[in-house]
Amino acid sequence: MTSVLVLNGPNLNLLGLREPEIYGADTLADVEAACVAHATANGFSVTCAQSNHEGALVDAIHAARGIHKGIVLNAGAYTHTSIALRDAIAGTQIPTVELHLSNIHAREPFRHHSMIAPVAVGMICGFGAAGYTLALDALIGHLGGTT
Ligand code: CA2
């Protein structure tokens, strides 16, 4: 069965616990359970991971080589700063869908630029937790829908 990785970055472990008006009421565990259910229903397996550390996220992308055919990545605030994450995606050439709960373009100017976007297959943002399953659908479609 084809496997994909859902990777979440810094502070996303706080989902559902703070700022629900921006990020929604679903917890990270809720989001991950929805990803597992959605991927499984589509014949894919999914591994979910989260880290608050940039290097650990780079390691997770490197470790995906040969295991996961694609990545859904919410890099959190590292989206806007991390050349290292961008280089990891470009270096591994693992198809990656960038995902944000909030519409980063409707927020503060410093969130408008993404380091990840130029090396991503595409970006989904602004649809809250539903964006994760939208991103999985986009990734599965990009991979050809085959298992
Ligand atoms: O909208 C998104 O998904 C973001 O990636 C979330 C990041 C933010 O820095 C990006 O600009 C957009 C922040 C994640 C923080 O998550 C929290 C969740 C609940 C409470 C506090 C923080």
Image: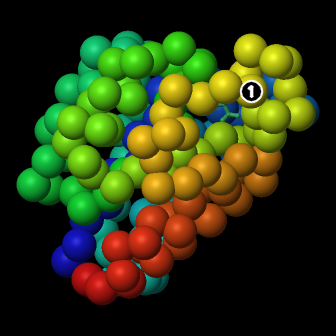
Q: Is residue 23 above or below residue 136?
A: above
- Name the residue that disc number 1 marks: 112
Q: Is residue 140 above or below residue 106?
A: below
Q: How many marks?
A: 1
Residue at x 53%, y 45% (from the top left corner): 98
Residue 133: percent from the left, percent from the top?
58, 64
Query: In the picture provided, is 142 more to the left or to the right than 88?
Result: right
Label 1: how many Cα within 10 Å (few below 14, some 14–19, many 20+) = few
Residue 27 found in image quarter = top right
Query: In the picture provided, is 12 more to the left or to the right than 92?
Result: right
Q: Residue furthest left?
A: 66
Residue at x 22%, y 57% (from the top left corner): 68
Closer-to-camera residue (8/26): 8
Residue 72: percent from the left, percent from the top?
45, 51
Specify the quarter for ligand 1: top right
Q: Classify the position of the C terminus by image quarter.
A: bottom left
Query: In the picture provided, is 88 more to the left or to the right than 63?
Result: right
- Amino acid type for the residue under numbered disc 1: His
Can residue 123 be spotted in the picture?
A: yes
Closer-to-camera residue (94/44): 94
Q: Is residue 94 above or below residue 136?
A: above
Residue at x 27%, y 51% (from the top left corner): 94
Residue 142: percent from the left, percent from the top?
42, 72
Q: Residue furthest front?
A: 118
Residue 69: percent from the left, percent from the top?
25, 62
Residue at x 56%, y 60% (from the top left corner): 135
Can residue 17 be spotted in the picture?
A: no
